[in-house]
Image: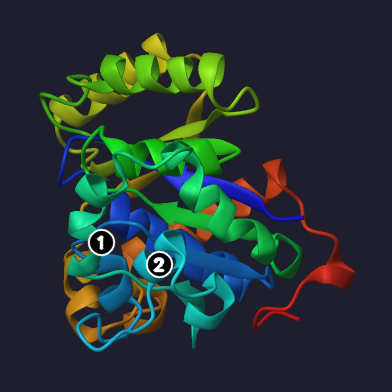
């Protein structure tokens, strides 16, 4: 049975997709069976794994509207499996608004895939609307990337309130997996102050690993690769491998069930 983790933050540019792609690749490299579900109409996680999002068909959109099975849309990559997305998903909010059980369409689509994976990572869109609500209803936990910038905590309370509302009304099992500090620069007082603030507001919920500002992390998506494949010895690659180790300490995978490169 897969553990499903939604990567969410309605503030854009915080490293959400970067973290989803790179943590997924490092978990796969460590031997876990990983499916990355791209649920952002921008399709950046899809292209970040080297898949042509324009040509991709079927996609997660067809899976949630019922014109294709999710299993038939899964693409195998060198960095784990992918359920791709593209701009077709952009109109889903309007199309699905009148459907009964519209909040659970993604969960329903992913259920048949549960047994095939250890982890399903969902890249959410950068907003709090129906698509993100589907992600939260499908997820066991939420991983929240937090940029080490001045407005880091702005909007976090809205996201936490939304998670609490979903827990109370739609998905009682959901919890916060953890907060991940991204774009961290230990040379600046600002990064240190933001880290202290986040840890003070969310005691025990902040990953020990921090993701540094690193040009290789920015370059890797344009090459269709996670940073661990683009520059394996870069600071960004080392940080995400460390994050994967910390994540697996919390969520161990039985050795006999692993199927990534480390098998």
Q: Earlier in the sequence, mark 1 or mark 2?
A: 2
| Residue, disc 1 | 89
In what quadrant of the picture does the N terminus appear?
bottom right
**Quick one: SS at disc 1?**
helix
- Residues at discs 1 and 2 in contact (Cβ within 8 Å): yes
Q: Give the percent coordinates (x, y) of residue 145.
A: 34, 39
In depth, the one of 135 and 210 nearer the eye is 135
Q: Is residue 63 visible?
A: yes
How many labels sit on residues?
A: 2
User: What is the C-alpha distance between the residues marked 1 and 2?
Assistant: 8 Å
Q: Give the percent coordinates (x, y) of residue 6.
A: 46, 45
**Which residue appears at 26% of the width and 32% of the height?**
128
Q: Is residue 209 visible?
A: no
**Which residue appears at 66% of the width and 79% of the height?**
260
Q: Is residue 164 left or right of residue 253?
A: left
Q: Give the percent coordinates (x, y) of residue 65.
A: 40, 61
| Residue, disc 2 | 60
Q: Is residue 245 left or right of residue 86?
A: right
* Res 103 quadrant in image: top left
**Which residue appears at 20% of the width and 31% of the height?**
191
- Which residue of the protein is positioned furthest toward the top in this rendering? 200
Q: Is residue 13 left or right of residue 114?
A: left
Does residue 37 sit above or below 93 in this rendering?
below
Question: Callout 2 environment at 10 Å: few (<14), some (14 to 19), or many (20+)?
Answer: many
Does residue 137 sit above or below 26 in this rendering?
above
Q: Give the percent coordinates (x, y) of residue 207.
A: 49, 35
- Which residue of the protein is positioned furthest toward the left in this rendering? 150
**Quick one: SS at disc 2?**
helix
- Which residue of the protein is positioned furthest toward the right in this rendering? 256
Does residue 216 sit above or below 1 in this rendering?
below
């Amino acid at each position: 049975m897969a553990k499903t983790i939604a990567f969410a933050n309605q503030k854009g540019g915080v490293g959400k997709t970067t973290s989803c792609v790179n943590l997924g690749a490092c978990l796969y490299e460590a031997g876990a069976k990983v499916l990355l579900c791209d649920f952002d109409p921008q399709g950046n996680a899809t292209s970040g794994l080297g898949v042509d999002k324009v040509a991709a068909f079927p996609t997660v959109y067809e899976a949630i509207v019922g014109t294709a099975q999710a299993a038939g849309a899964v693409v195998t990559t060198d960095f784990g499996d992918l359920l791709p997305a593209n701009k077709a998903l952009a109109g889903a909010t309007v199309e699905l608004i009148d459907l009964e059980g519209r909040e659970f369409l993604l969960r329903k689509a992913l259920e048949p895939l549960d047994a095939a994976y250890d982890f399903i990572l969902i890249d959410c869109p950068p907003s709090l609307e129906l698509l993100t609500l589907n992600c939260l209803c499908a997820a066991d936990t939420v991983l929240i990337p937090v940029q080490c910038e001045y407005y880091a905590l702005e909007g976090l309370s809205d996201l936490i309130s939304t998670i609490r509302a979903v827990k109370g009304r739609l998905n009682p099992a959901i919890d916060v997996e953890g907060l991940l500090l991204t774009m961290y620069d230990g040379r600046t007082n600002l990064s240190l102050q933001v880290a202290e603030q986040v840890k003070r507001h969310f005691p025990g919920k902040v990953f020990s690993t921090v993701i540094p500002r690193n040009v290789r992390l920015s370059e890797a998506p344009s090459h269709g690769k996670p940073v661990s494949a683009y520059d394996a010895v870069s600071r960004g690659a080392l940080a995400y491998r460390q994050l994967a180790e910390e994540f697996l300490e919390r969520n161990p995978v039985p050795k006999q069930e692993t199927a990534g490169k480390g098998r």
